[in-house]
Amino acid sequence: MVKYHHCEKCKGIYDTEPWIGEVHTYNGICASCIDRDQGSNQVSQENIEENLLDDYVKEQAEIVQDTDEHTRSTPLEIEKNLLSSLEQKAHEVFSGKGSINVLIKEIKDDLIDKARERIEKTFQSFDVNKIDAQKTVDYAESFLSYLSEYKDFVDSVVKAIEIKPKLKIKTALDKVSKESMANLPKDVAKDMLLNRKAILKTISEKAGEWYNIYSDTRDPFELIKKLSLHPFNEIQKKLSTLPFYNSAN
């Protein structure tokens, strides 16, 4: 039988000797490794640090990846988070920190369209609750057709009050409504003009209706803030009644 001497660096066999039984030891260095060590320069401290940094980066990446796998949100959770943060997103837009058109697209793509898909998966075609759910989404979507123009309208109201601080909100609403109608471009197709007039009429009526809800608010800018957020709160309130969004899970 034989005792095998393995190089502790390359693990190759560099010597043998007779032995009782077969034994493997790893406590020496072969000639090739000795020559290689003697013929090469020592690894610089800089390279050692780079290697340590590489190892650290890899380790951190693995930790982040592992964390992401455990914390990654489901599509339903993403939709719920968007729904719950809708008021805050709208407030940021009206504060000049975001785009109203981007928010409208986000609501359309990630809430309205996703809700319709979930309705089809949640309800059987003969389920009477399916019709109510579809009406709920239709109602929420109806706000999207004029949200961009509504923001322009509210911005104009704010400017009017900034110019004349003593101007009452209701007066400012009426003033902006009349000016918006008067300033409509005349050199456009008739159908486009009529559509624009219809949107402005809707906005004016809605603003007046919502003003009546919040008219007891004393601070004019707080009142305007409530008017600004009202349609988004309505969308949020309606969609939150859908079974897949109001469930605990």
Image (cartoon, helix red, strand yellow):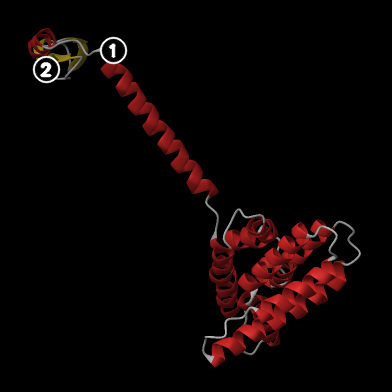
N-term mark: 2 or 1 = 2
Residue 60 lies left or right of residue 14; in this view the side is right
Q: Nearer the viewer, residue 91 or 125?
A: 91
Q: Residue at x 82, y 61 (%)?
A: 223
What crowding class fits label 2: few (fewer than 14 Cα within 10 Å), some (14-19), or many (20 or more)?
Answer: some
In depth, the one of 57 and 18 nearer the eye is 57
From this view, report whether residue 142 is shown above or below residue 13.
below
Q: Is residue 61 visible?
A: yes
Q: Secondary structure at mark 1?
A: helix
Location of residue 220 in the rendering, given as x and y in whole percent from the top left corner: 83, 59
Instruction: Please give the label number shown on residue 13.
Output: 2
Residue carrying label 1: 45
Relative horizontal placement of residue 97, taking residue 57 as reference (left or right): right
Left or right, 15 with reference to 227: left
Numbered-mark total? 2
Q: Quadrant of the C terminus?
A: bottom right
Q: Residue at x 63, y 73 (%)?
A: 149
Q: Say above or below: 19 vs 140.
A: above
The three-letter code of the residue at mark 1 reads Gln
Give the number of the mark in front: 2 or 1: 1
Dividing the picture into quadrants, the one containing residue 124 is bottom right
Q: In the image, what residue type sits under mark 2?
A: Ile
Image coords of residue 152 (percent x, y):
65, 68
Where is residue 137? Give x, y as percent.
65, 78
